[in-house]
Amino acid sequence: MSISELNMNTLKTIFIQSDLSWENPEANRNYFKTKINEITTDTDLIILPEMFSTGFSMNATSLAEEMEGETVTWMQQIAQEKNVAIMGSLIIKSPFDSNKNNSSFYNRLLFVLPSGEIQYYDKRHTFTLAKEDETYTSGNKKLIVTYKGWKICPLICYDLRFPAWARNQEDYDLLIYIASWPKTRISAWDALLKARAIENMSYTIGVNRIGLDGNNYEYVGHSIAYDSLGNALSKELNEDECLISVDLHKEEQNSVRKKLGFLNDKDEFIIQ
C-alpha cells in the first residue's frame, strides 16, 4: 500500500465534548479556538456539537448569521490554518426572499474543508417538542461529503430517531451525528447511535454537549464512536469536558462488509 493509499485508508478524527456559553457566539468561538490549539496530534477532521456557537436556542432573530458571517468565517480560518476539515452546526439566516416576503432560518451543519470550501446540510427533522419547527425551516437534502477518499454522511440530533433518513443507500463510510441531546433521554441516544452503526454497517460518531443551557436543560455528553459492528472505539459514557481522538480505518470496515454482505440485502426506497 502506497503512502497516499495509507493516508486515504485512515481518517484521524477529534471531537470536542463541551459546555456552551448560552447565546454567546464570541465566547464559544474563543473557547473552541483554545481547545483546537491544544491539539498536537495529526488530525483530519474536528467535530463540534450542534449549534456550537449559541447553544440550542430558538432566538434565531437575534442570533442568526449569514453564510458570510463571523462564525462561518471563523470555521474557514480554522480549517485553513490547521489544514483540517471542521464541522458543526449554527443558526443561519437565508437572504431575504422577495417572492415569499420573508427570510428563513436554518439549523445548518457546515462541513468546511481545509481549502475553506463549505458544504452544508440543513437539519431535516426539526425538534417539534421544543417547537424548533416553528422557528427553523427543515432541510430536504441529504449530504454526502467526499473527503480524503471517505464518504461521510453528517446529520443533526433529532435525525437520530429516524433511521430511514440515515439508511446507507449511498455506501458511505462514516455516519456522524452532532447533538444537543438532554440527560433525560440519554439512554435513547446511547441505544440509537449503536443501532445506526450496526444497521448501516458504518463507522458512526455521535458528538453531544454537556452542561446546562439557558432553559435549564441538562446535557451529559456520552459522545462516542462505534465501528460497523457496534463496538465502541472510544471511552463510553463520558460526562465531562473532553477531546476524544479516534482513528478510523476504511479497509478494516470494507473487509467486514465484504465478509458479511449485509448491505447487499438492503431495501431500496425513496424518501419523499
Image (tube, rainbow, N blue to C red):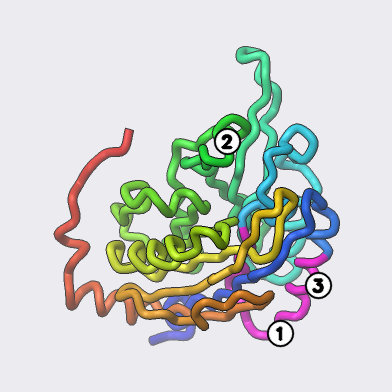
Give amino acid for label 3: Thr
Q: What secondary structure is found at the residue carrying circle 2? A: loop
The answer to the question of whether label 1 and label 2 lie on touching residues, with beta carbons closer than 8 A, is: no
- Residue 47, compared with residue 59, is above or below; it is below
Q: Position of residue 165 (x, y in %)?
A: 36, 47
| Figure quadrant of residue 9 | bottom left
Viewer-side label of 3, 2 = 2
Q: Which residue type carries mark 2?
A: Lys
Q: Nearer the viewer, mark 1 or mark 3?
A: 3
167 and 253: which is toward the camera: 167
**Where does residue 193 sit, x and y in percent of width and height?**
41, 64
Classify mark 3: helix, strand or loop: helix
Q: Position of residue 99 (x, y in %)?
A: 62, 12
Q: To which residue does mark 3 refer? A: 34
Point 72% across, 65% down: residue: 19
Callout 1 amino acid: Thr
Q: Is residue 114 above or below residue 89?
A: below
- Residue 131's disc is 2
In the rendered image of this protein, does residue 196 appear above or below residue 162?
below
- Closer to the chain start, of discs 1 and 3, is 3
Which label sits on residue 25?
Answer: none
Mark 3 crowdedness (10 Å alpha carbons): few <14, some 14-19, many ≥20: few
Q: Residues in magenta? A: 31-49
Name the residue: 59% across, 30% down: 134
Q: Is residue 71 visible?
A: yes
Q: Which quarter of the figure is the C terminus placed in?
A: top left
